[in-house]
Structures are given as C-alpha cells and as structure tokens.
Image: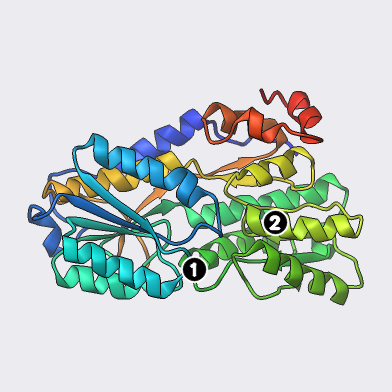
Amino acid sequence: MKKSSLISLAAVASVSALMLAGCSSSGGGGGSSDTGTPAANSRACVILPDAASSPRWEGMDRPALEKAFTDAGFEADIQNAQGDTSKYATIADQQLSKGCGVMVLVDYNGAAVAVAAKAKGEGIPVIAYDRPIEGADYYVSFDNEKVGELQGQSIVDGLKAEGKDPATAIVVYMGGDPADGNAKMFHDGAVKIMSAAGIKPAQEPPGVWDGDKSATNFEQALTALGGKVDAVWVANDTNAAGVITILDKNGLKVPVSGQDASVAGLQNVLLGKQTATVWKHVPDEAAAASDLAVKLLKGETPTVDMKLADGTPYIAVTPVLVGPDMVKEVVAAGDATAAELCTGEVAAACTANGVQ
C-alpha cells in the first residue's frame, strides 16, 4: 500500500497542539458551572477500564497520565477496574471518599455513567477519557470516526492492490463491543469509506473486545461463507490477532485492519498479515486530558471549541494509519522498540522496512 497521504508524527503533535490551543483560562463555555470554582482537592482521580482489551491502558496511559499530573504538582490516584463493573464502582467510591479535584474516567460497559453522576453531584468535574460518557463535562479522545475512516480506506486500498473490485469483494466486519461508545464511531467511520466503494458486509458477527472471542466469531463467519473471504475489517489489533490465527489456520492472507499499533499488531503489519494499524500516539491523548484536568484543578474554566452531538465539549486528537513503511516512525516515537518487534520471522521484515 502507498502511504503518501500519511501525516508525520510532527504533524500529529502539531494538530494536537492546535486542539489544545482551544483551551484557555479566559472566557466561559465548554464546561459545567461547577468547573469555574477552584478545586477543593488537588488529587486527580483516574479509572482505567481493564488490561485485556488493549495493552495501552497500563503500558502507555497510566505512566503518561501519572507523569503529567506529578510534574504539574498534583497527586494522581490511578486505578484499573480490570474489566469488572462492580470493581469500577468500588474504586470510584474509594477515590471519592478520599477526595478528588477532578475525575478522569475511561468507561467500561457503562459503569462510568453512575460514577460521573455521583462525582458531579459532589461538584467534581468529570473528563470522559477515550470513550464518551453520558453526563461528562468534557470528552478527550482521538478522532474516533477518523480512526474508522482510516481503517476502511486500508481495506479498500488493500483490495485494489490485490486487483479485486471492492464492490464484489467478500468482506467480513468484526467490530468492537457495542457497550463501548467508541465502537459505533469506529464502525460508522469505516462503513462511510467502505460503502462508498461499494462494500457491503458478507458477515457481521457480534462486536467484542476480546481476541479469543473474535477468533471464534470469525471462524464461524468464515465457515458460513464456505471458507471464502477477500478482506476483514477489524476494529483493533487484539481482535485482528484473533482473526489472523483463523486465516493462518486456513492458509489465507487477505487485507485486515486494526488499531492501537500494539506490538502484535505492528508485527502482523510487518509480516503482511495485517494491512495496516491505526496509530494513536497515547502521549498526545494523555497530554490533552491532563492539560485539561490541570486547568480544572487550578480552578480555571477551559474553553473547548469542538462539541459532540449531545453538546459535550470535545478535544479530538488526530490518529495516523501505519503500514509496513511507517512502523519505524512508531519506534522512533518510543511507542514500540525494535528489540520487542524484530524477533523470529519478523526480523527480516524489520530490516526491509528500516526498523532498527
């Protein structure tokens, strides 16, 4: 695939900076009436969703957020619900009992909605981080529909590169868990691009954020299609890895999408088993969220120019599509290392693509 249209890491940083430029301590707008009052507590309370759906939460988000709050002189209480809605609620109660100046919540199966309501009832501003939350004061995430658009384009381009007409191709859609508010945005963005090229889903199993379940669902879909498939739109790298195990098992190699630029995802991209992954440079998102949170902790009322459909102020960070020739950029940014990527059969692909 050609990647001439891809933007560089420098461009990503520039776009992120422009987005954050919309936040200032002057003027109103953007937040709830509570956020203009100086925070009574200097603790930033953060709840992450799990460690299974993506390695980013513990490997990238936690350290980036913790460093940002600590460097700004605030205490960071960052905990992980480990995929348990009851634990999510318990963590929130414990954090609120100790006091929070701001809450930064990554939703898990709707658990953050009640937490956000409780926090706001105590006058604590809430930032929905990465996933939208009903009732949050702000939403900070990557441009999720753009993520889907990049994925959809990678499927269209992948089919064309193989000389296949997208309009007649057999494409399976493997979406994310519908309980995750972002899953619909990924799906809608991908469908926007793929449908414009004439693609319709041959099979669309239930959405999940689970590699093993994704593998099972895809295997059932492939069986229903008589073992024939031309491409698979997959919402993230973890699910894509599950799909690829079934493709390998059946001796198939077709265009497959993903996101997160995980080690496994990048290795599959280098090996040509995954057409591309959408790279979301987590430090950019963490910087956007922590900068916003620090303003709130200081008692400022940020102004945010963008809004979701429901009116929630929205800071969107730009994602990047990564094919084999762009993996070296991910390594250069520190989101992966050549040592962890370039093992076994991947070593030759690393050399061919300048990953070192």
- Between 41 and 9, the one nearer to me in the picture: 41
- Find residue 132 and report its image quarter: bottom left
Residue in view at x 63 percent, y 42 percent:
263
User: Who comes first in sequence, dot 2 or dot 1?
Assistant: 1
Residue 200 visible here: no
Q: Residues within 10 Å of mark 2 (few under 14, many from 20)?
A: many
Residue in view at x 56 percent, y 61 percent:
186
- In what element is the residue under mark 2? helix
| Residue of label 1 | 180
Q: Please, what is the three-letter code of the amino acid marked with disc 1?
A: Asp
Q: How many marks?
A: 2
Q: Please, what is the three-letter code of the amino acid marked with disc 2?
A: Ala
- In what element is the residue under mark 1? loop
| Disc assigned to residue 240 | 2
**Direction from residue 295 to residue 57 in the image, left or right:** right
Q: Quick check: 42 above or below 6? A: below
- Between 163 and 122, the one nearer to me in the picture: 122
Q: Position of residue 18 (x, y in %)?
A: 34, 38
Residue in view at x 82 percent, y 35 percent:
345
Q: Quadrant of the C terminus?
A: top right
**Direction from residue 153 to residue 222 in the image, left or right:** right
Q: CA distance from mark 2 to mark 1?
A: 18 Å
